[in-house]
Amino acid sequence: MKFGLFDHIDRRDEAPSTTYAGRLELLCAAEKAGFYGYHVAEHHWTPLGMAPSPGIFLSAAIQRTTTLRIGSMVHLLPLYHPLRLIEEICMLDHLSGGRFDFGVGRGVSPFEVGYFGINAIEGYARHEETLDIVLKGLTRDTLDHQGHFYNFHGVPMEMKPLQRPHPPLWSGAGSPASLAFSAARGCHVVALGPNAAVKAQADTYRDIWPKYAAERKERKMTVETPFIGSSLNIFVAETDAEAERIATPAFLRFHDSLAHLWLKWRTKPSHIVGDLATARKLGATVIGSPATVRELLEKRASETGTNYMMLEMAWGTLGHEAEMRSMDLFAKEVLPRFVSA
């Protein structure tokens, strides 16, 4: 089992510059603890996302780390012109010394892409075409493409990524069709939700992975065994009572950020959990003492069959000091159990 740090960088009652500084310190602590990677989300026009340009924040993270893999989870592909994105990926890959991971997705919120004038119904098609263009551009000397949204002829690809054929791809697990799309392109995947739901998606991905070996070979994908992970919020304190005292109001703020645009448009999707008790029952949030957190994470690993845990350790009103203490407790009293397993 490997661990990664996931981050929305949701708004706090402080200047974003203060939040950024705290996050950079936290991810450095994650690197010191032995985490595999850091993954930042992309959101727009909502307090959920104070890093709407993930590449800019990742470039700062790159300069403060040496071994931690640095990536997006995910770049919202319908919002990017593929030629600009190709160049950005190459820059991040070289700045990181080949530590950049490229997360891809269409975006979960129709409101965010809608503000850019993009019809969410087109999201799947835009996502697929943009990714295929980007992968062509990263692996060829000249880019030619004729599609529904873009047409290019003879574009010289002067920049090349450091990692070949390109940086590793990550995507969120979802429908059978999206899992098939990811398997054909050699993506690592991360699932959300209760243990049973994560297990179902993990089992499906393992089953279909061999079926797309020929397509991955044709695309020159080199991933043999993908990360199949799960994502969840986590907070560790000295005692269960202390963890609950701090995390309860923090979760309310985090929920308000998650649901902000949905509530603005007088709707609310079923995937947003409204209270901490339900989130804990579903396994989407784990809080408690080191012993409690160890037990719950071992249960999630065992019941889901995943090999990667993407932990969100900074959220809501937890505060930087509490998050650093949580990371320290996790590194000293939780992580060793998994490393020695």
Image (cartoon, grey):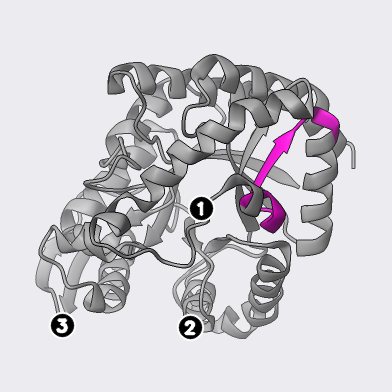
Judging by the rendered image, the residue that carries numbered circle 3 is 148
* Label 2: which secondary element: helix
Disc 2 to disc 1, C-alpha distance:
28 Å
Q: Residues within 10 Å of mark 3 (few under 14, many from 20)?
A: few
The reply to whether discs 3 and 1 touch (Cβ–Cβ < 8 Å) is: no
Percent across and percent down for residue 55 are 30, 39
- Residue appearing at x 67%, y 41% in the figure: 3
Locate the C terminus by quadrant.
Answer: top right
Seen from the viewer's position, the closer of residues 6 and 281 is 281
Judging by the rendered image, the residue that carries numbered circle 2 is 177
Residue 255 position (above or below residue 164): above
Q: Residues within 10 Å of mark 2 (few under 14, many from 20)?
A: few
Percent across and percent down for residue 156 are 14, 59
Seen from the viewer's position, the closer of residues 318 and 311 is 318
On the image, which quarter does residue 133 sit in? Answer: bottom left
- Residue appearing at x 51%, y 72% in the figure: 174
Judging by the rendered image, the residue that carries numbered circle 1 is 274
In the current view of this chain or complex, which residue is farthest to the right? 341
* Label 1: which secondary element: loop
Q: What amino acid does circle 2 point to?
A: Ala
Magenta region = 279-291
